[in-house]
Image: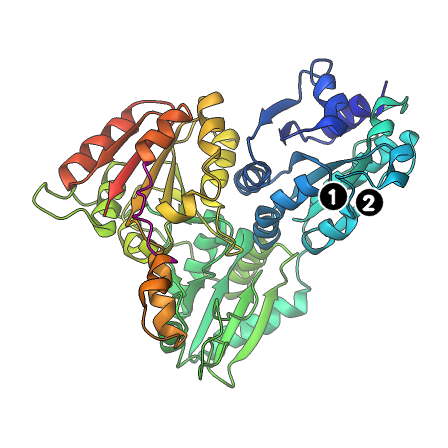
Amino acid sequence: MNGAECLLRTLLVNDVDLCLMNPGTSEMQFVSALDRVPAMRGVLGLFEGVCSGAADGYARMTGKPASVLLHLGPGLGYALSNLHNAKKARSPVVNIVGEHSTQHLAYDAPLSADIEAFARPVSAWVHTLREAGQMGMSAAAAVEAAWPGNVSTLIVPADYSWSEAGEPGAHRQRPARALPAPDVILQIAEVLRKGGKLSILLNGQAQHERGLRAAHRLRALTGVRIFAARYGARLSRGGNVPAVERIPYFPEPAQALLSELERMILVEAKPPVSFFGYPNLRSTLAPPGCIFDVLAEESQDGTAALEWLCDELGAPRVDVQAAQPGGVPTGSEPLTAAAIGRTVAALAPEGAVFSDEAVSSSEQLWPHLAYARQHDHLPNTGGSIGQGLPVALGAALACPDRKVISFEGDGSAMYTFQALWTMARESLDVTVIIMANRRYRILDVEMTRTGSGPVGNQAERMIDLKNPLLQWVDLARGLGVPATQAATVEEFVAAFAQAMHEPGPKLIEALL
C-alpha cells in the first residue's frame, strides 16, 4: 500500500479514527485514501485553526487524540493558535503536515517553509519522514508521543505518501499514568492532619467528577479549601458534583481570595499566576511565603492520588445535594449575561457541554451555571482567541448524544466563525450563543488597568465593533446554521428553549 493508506491504517490500529483536515496538493493522496480506509472519519474545516481547535475539544471529551491534516508550513501557521491552546490544555493531538516532494524541496518554491521550526513551539515531538518505508513506524510513534497529553507533529513529504510504504505500524500501548511515591502521600496526609490555612489546587483530570468527589471527602474531613485552576481543560460542574472555588481572573481579587493561605497542595497543577502582568502588581497569586506541596505532578494520576490520600486519612464518602436550577428570567428583565446564565442553567439538559469563550461576559455567567444540571465546562486554556467555536465542534464530534452549548463573544467568534459551516455539514448538536456587546469589551477594562490613558477617538476605533455592525444572523445562515436574534429576555428564553428541544446546530445572537 502507498504511504497515505499506510498512515491512515496505522492511526486506526492505534485508536485514532478521526481526521480533521484542510488539505492541499501535497495531501491529495491522503484524501484519496479515505475511500479505501472508510473507518477513518474525515471532517473538513474551512480554516486550519478550526481543525486544530476541534481536535483539542475532541481530546478533552474523549481523552484520546484526533489527527489533524494540514497543508505545508502556511497551513500549520494558520493552525498554531489553537495548537497553542491544545498544548496548554494538555490535549493529545496527532498533527500531520504535508511537505513538498523531496525532489521539489531544492527549488525554494513559493510555499516552501521551515515546517519543523513552525511546529516546535507547540509540539512535544516533531519528526520529518525520511523514507516511505518508515511511514508506519513513524505514524505509530506520533500517536505514542501524543498519548501523555501532547501535540505531536509528523511532517510527510508528498512523494512518500504516493510511494510504496509497506505494512501499517504496530499498535502502541497507551501509557498508564504514574502514581506519586508512597512517601509523598504520607507527607501530604501529615500536612492535612496538622491543619492550618490550607488549600488544594486541582487541574487536569483531577477536575473531572471522580477527582472532585475525592477532594470533597478531604474537605469534609479536614476543612481544607478546594480551588479549581481557572484554565483547566475540563471541569465537571452542576447537579450533585461537589462545587469548588475558581480563582478569579484579575490579580487583585485572586490575591485577596488566597491572602491567608499558608500552604497549597498542587494536584496536576502549577502555582497560580495572573493572566497578565500589571504595573505595580506581583504576578504570583498565592501570598509570599506560601508553601507549595506537590501531591501529583502534571503527568501523574492526580485523581488516584486524591483517593489514596482519602484512604490514608480515613475520609468517609460524602453525599452531595444536587444544585437546584432556578427559574428562567422574566420578560421584564434586561437581557444581560447574568440573565443568559440563569436561562441556560434552568433549561440546559443533563450532560450538556459548555464551551466558554464569552471573555468579558464570562464572569457574569459563571455563578449562575453552578445551578445547572450536571455538565462539563471547557474554558479557553491558552488565552489565544478563536478557541470557543472549534472546541464546541470537537466536543460535539466526541459526544454526539450530548447537547453542546457555546458561549461566544461577538469579537472572539469572528476569529474562527468558519466552524459554523462544519457544524452544519456534520449536523452537530451545538447551540451557539453570541454575547453581542458589539465591542472588544475586555479591552475597555485592560486600557484602564494597564494605565494606558483615556480612550480617544482613534483608540475607540480599535475597540468598537459597531461600524459596520456584525450581522451574526446573516453570517450563520450563510454558513448553513439556523439563526435568530434576541434583544429581550423573553426572546432569548424562547429561542434557547427551542434550541434545547431540537437537534442540530443553532445560533442565537443575544444583544446585550
Q: Is residue 24 magenta?
A: no
Rendered image: mark on residue 379? none
The reply to whether discs 2 and 1 touch (Cβ–Cβ < 8 Å) is yes
Give the image quarter of residue 221.
bottom left
Q: Is residue 461 left or right of residue 276?
A: left
Return the x and y of residue 226 as percentages of the image width and height.
Answer: 42, 64
Q: Is residue 466 magenta?
A: yes
Q: Is residue 56 left or right of residue 71?
A: left
Residue occupying the point 37% across, 73% down: 449
Residue, far top: 36
Q: Identify the magenta region.
A: 462-471
Give the camera-side residue of 319 and 128: 128
The answer to whether 40 is drawn above or below residue 323 in the figure is above
Residue occupying the point 48% across, 34% down: 418
Q: Is residue 121 visible?
A: yes
- Element type at mark 1: strand
Q: Amino acid at mark 1?
A: Thr
Residue position marked by numbered label 2 in the rendering: 127
- Quadrant holding the N terminus: top right
Residue position marked by numbered label 1 in the rendering: 153
Q: Is residue 99 left or right of residue 458?
A: right
